[in-house]
Amino acid sequence: MVKFSRLDEFKKRYTLEQRSKEASKLMNKYADRVAVIVTTQDGMSPLEKRKYLVPRDNTLGQLMHVIRKHLKVQQKNALWFSTDSNYIPPMSQTMVQIHKEYVDEDGLLYLKINEENTFG
């Protein structure tokens, strides 16, 4: 099983109260967006930016397209998202649907990017 220490670092850096306050502020200011924290699995190059405000009606596939541009991964590597509970949502699911089901207690949606070499 892959460890996701970067997510732990984010949650350790900011208290639950700080994260909840930030999520509340973002939800009030950007009601048409979902606040997402994106981390990468260990061994992958980290993202320069981990906080994203994604339009509620965007699909997970659209977010993947944006994220893939920022990552330094080869085309032969498959990428997919998983939630804190290790659920792999379909790429066609909208961000608001994923947010409703898998939002953290602080009000933020945490997604992890996983990578697999698909051609050996």
Image (cartoon, rainbow, N blue to C red):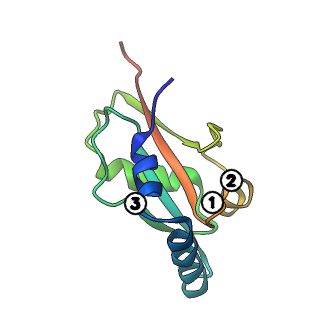
Q: Quadrant of residue 30?
A: bottom right
- The residue tagged 2 is 102
Label at residue 95: 1
Residue 99: x %, y % from top left: 67, 60
Report the Cα–Cα distance between label 3 and label 1.
Answer: 25 Å
Residue drawn at x 37%, y 29% is 77
Going by the image, does 26 lie left or right of 71?
A: right
Instruction: Tell me the amino acid under the disc marked 1.
Output: Met
Closer to viewer: mark 3 or mark 1:
3
Residue reaching furthest to the top: 120
Q: Quadrant of residue 108?
A: bottom right
Residue 56: x %, y % from top left: 62, 69
Q: Secondary structure at mark 3?
A: helix
Disc 2 crowd, CA 10 A, few/some/many (<14, 14-19, 20+): some
- The residue tagged 3 is 13
Disc 1 crowd, CA 10 A, few/some/many (<14, 14-19, 20+): many
Residue 2: x %, y % from top left: 46, 28
Q: Is residue 39 above or below residue 51?
A: above
